[in-house]
Amino acid sequence: MSRALAEDRSRLTWWILGGLLAAVLIYIVSAYVGTFVFGVFIYYATRPVYRRLKRRVQPSSLAAGISLFVLALPALLLLIYTVAIAVQEFNRFTERYDISLLEPYISPYLGVTSFPRTPEELLAGNGLELAGDLVNTVTTYVGIVGMGALHLFIMIAIAFYLLRDDARLVRWVRRHFADGAGVFEVYASAVDRSFHQVFFGNLLNAVLTAVIGALSYHLLNLVAPVGVVIPYPTLIGLLAGVASLVPVVGMKLVYVPVAAYLAAAPLLSGRPSTLWFAALFFAVSFVIVDTIPDFVLRPYVSGRNLHVGMVMFAYIFGPLVFGWYGIFLGPMLLVLIIHFARLVLPELVAGVPIRPVAVDPSHMIDPPAAEEPSPGTDATEATGGGRGAGSGAE
């Protein structure tokens, strides 16, 4: 008896330790849940490329790295091209307009009240204090950029190891969590297929959004007033498509600065009557390029085997409930719930052994009732009785 009691205490100690470790793991994941969810998205986005490369490229680590690079390369080239164009346009803007007129609008965001225009102004009065404020502001922005780079590294690392070791992870999960009836395997396979469709749908939505944005901005330029046009409409449309992958803020990172640029140009040139074009650009960007694809097109392309309305509500309520990462976590939870309700819940409620149709289709069909013999037919033949019938079945 004492030995059994000692074993029970030992097991209880291990359960307590396991509970503490699980709590620590949940705390870490909850603190960076958005980063983990986005890493899973990158994994599903690059998995088709990785699986094709793995047949020709060895080792698997190299194939995973190339797959991530193939996904990141277009975005990286687009970013470099955008920065080059932005610098070029900023130089043209400063040469054409007197940007000192924008000082009252810019200085509050930089934490300063006026800008020194000569070295003497910098050293005189509160110039040193101004320089200190600028340094503090720059340091703050550098910290934000550094934290963003850290999150990006974690996302890529999660995607990399999932690509390289997903088969090993599947074997480990099957070994420890699989049941004899095959329920877990069927449920996990259905969830995996739906995740692939949902996340691939996000990429497809980004491509379609880029096309819609580019066409919309080219059409807007047809009605633009003289001297105020959307610069590089195709590039801005592509950037809008890429930015649509960023939850919540998304394309606002693109069209809000462009709208500010279109509004600043008339103010600096003394033609406030053309401000209507900046307002029109913002309205078209918000409604046609941003809202309609996000709430209508994205659920359709992401939920081909799910109810489109439910997918739409998942995309709407996900960010509202969970924050910026809810646009990915919401559909993920929807997939988990739907397949649980489809494969497991009915038999849990009925209190019968859980055997999904993909494993044992026969249990979903009631045994057919014995047909009455047709006129002129022997009852023994109708019921398949007799030695001959049994032999034939064998």
Image (cartoon, rainbow, N blue to C red):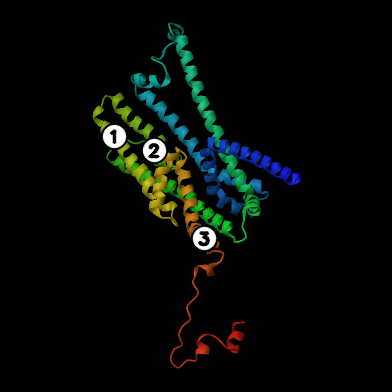
Report the residue marked by disc 3.
Answer: 351
Q: Quadrant of the C terminus?
A: bottom right
Residue at (61, 52) in percent of width and height: 53
Q: Which of 123/36 is in front?
A: 36
Structural distance between the alpha carbons of marks 3 and 2? 63 Å
Front position among marks 2 and 1: 1
The secondary element bearing badge 2 is classed as loop
Q: Relative to residue 71, is residue 382 depicted above or below?
A: below
Report the residue marked by disc 1.
Answer: 279
Label located before the other in sequence (1 or 3): 1
The secondary element bearing badge 3 is classed as loop
Q: Which of 235/352 is in front?
A: 352
- Are the residues tagged 1 and 3 within 8 Å (C-beta)? no
Label located before the other in sequence (2 or 1): 2
- Are the residues tagged 3 and 2 within 8 Å (C-beta)? no
Report the residue marked by disc 2.
Answer: 232
Residue at (27, 34) in percent of width and height: 226
Q: Position of residue 320 (x, y in %)?
A: 41, 39
Q: Which three-letter amino acid code belongs to the residue tagged 2? A: Tyr
Q: Which three-letter amino acid code belongs to the residue tagged 1? A: Ala
Q: Is residue 272 left or right of residue 378?
A: left
In the rendered image, is residue 76 in sight?
no
Q: Relative to residue 338, is residue 330 depicted above or below?
A: above
Q: Specify few, some or many for label 3: CA neighbours under 10 Å numbering under 14, 14-19, or 20 or more.
A: few
